[in-house]
Each structure stands twice: as structure tokens, then as C-alpha cells.
Image (tube, rainbow, N blue to C red):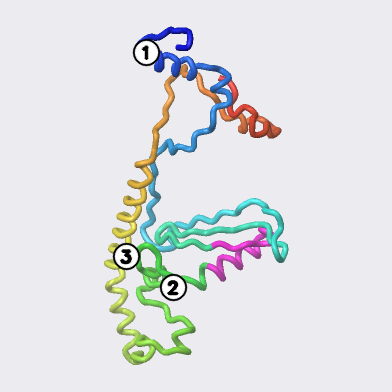
Amino acid sequence: MRLGYYWLSMYRDVAEVIRKCWSGQLHAPVSKALRHSMIPVASPWSFCKWAIDLVRPFPAGPGGVKFLVMAIDYFTKWVEAKPLKTISGKPIRNFVWESIAHRTTLKGATNEAPFSLVYGSEAVIPAEINVPTMCIASFDESSNSEELCENLNFLEERREMAAIKEAINKQRIASYYDKRVQPLSFQLDDLVWPKNEASTAEDMGKLGPKWEGP
């Protein structure tokens, strides 16, 4: 333009040339865009499906902890996490016993406590013994067994209602997630740029190439 040249598709043509520039593509930033729709994982009832994962070593913290164990119940989305010194069998067993088995009264997205959905009745926690609640004040040992049986009769319906709430909640989350997805697909014989960090042993630095190939 400074030399006096101009044509109608100048901007578009220049942008196309830049897109095909080998050096430009080699150093192009890595896109953070979501590329695939969310696939929700369903669970029919509490404790049916769990995920437990170990996170690799961090710099040692207070007490020498440097690992992290995390667990999530697929049904209620109830998450537990705990830092550990080691990831041997005993610490993991203690984590499951202390952080999961002893804490089944927490309510998740279904507004139902996992203990209640498994056994049909709300658990009585130690705090309710020291500070009596209505549940403790109205307790009648003679009719307790009969009432527990009645609760079991309604358990299937409560589980079904909780499953419906879970499905609705997951659909809402997936819908929000999918709005930000920018699909990316390739055809046979397409040339692609693999991420450089996938095969480069040493760090290339901030100004190093982001991609290799095509």
C-alpha cells in the first residue's frame, strides 16, 4: 500500500499467505479451545462407581507430604482428597476408611446423603447424641425396626428421584460445556503439526517452537 498498490481482496490474500507461513505455524501458540463434546458418565446409585487417583510427587510440604490421593463418587459428585507421605497400601486403605466410610452423611448434587440412599435412613452422627435433635428426641426403640422397614419400602423411589436429579444436573453441565467447544477434525492425507513437547526431551524455552512437522 505504501508503494501505491491496492486490490480488492488484499487483506484476505495477505491473511492467507500468513496462515501458510512455515515459521509462523511452527511458533504458533497452542490453542486452549475445547475440541470435543462432554460425555457424562452415569452411575445408577451411590457407591456403585468410584474414581480414585494418585497425583505424582510435589515438592515436600509440612510433615513430609508430597503425594495427593483423590476420590470421587460418580453418583453424588462427592470429592475427598488427602495429602500423603507415601502411596503404599496402608495409607490408601486408611484414606478410604477415614475419608469415605466415616463420612457418608454428606449430601451431594442430588440433595440426598449417600448413606441414606444405600440403607434407606439418615445416619445418626455423634454430634446429634451430645446435642439432641428432633430425630433423637422422638426416638422410640419399640417402633424403630418397623419404621426402618417402612423407609426401605420408599428407598427405590428415592433412588430413582435422585438418579433423575443427577441426570438433569449432568445435562445442564454438558450443555454449558458444549457451548464452548470448537470442533476440530482431520481428513485422510491432511498434514498436521504435532505438539513439540510431546517428543522433545529438553525444554525449548518460551521462544522455542511450539510445533514440529508437518
Labels 3 and 1: the sequence-earlier one? 1
Total marks in image: 3
Image spot of residue 63 (x, y percent): 71, 66
Q: Which residues are magenta?
A: 81-99
Q: Nearer the viewer, residue 25 or 15?
A: 15
Residue located at (46% from left, 88% from top): 129
Horizontal side of residue 174 vs 18, given as left or right: left
Image spot of residue 54 (x, y percent): 60, 54
| Residue on which the image places disc 2 | 105
Q: Label 3, label 1: how many angstroms apart (C-alpha)?
A: 63 Å
Identified by mark 1, the residue type is Ser
Horizontal side of residue 141 vs 84, given as left or right: left
Q: Nearer the viewer, residue 124 or 154?
A: 124
Q: Are marks 1 and 2 in contact (CB under 8 Å)?
A: no
Say few, some or many: other residues with alpha carbon within 10 Å of mark 1 (under 14 / 14 to 19 / 20 or more). few
Q: Label 3, label 2: how many angstroms apart (C-alpha)?
A: 16 Å
Image quadrant of residue 194? top right
For residue 138, above or below residue 202: below
| Residue on which the image places disc 1 | 9
Identified by mark 3, the residue type is Arg
Taking the magenta stretch, the answer to whether it contains residue 56 is no
| Residue on which the image places disc 3 | 159
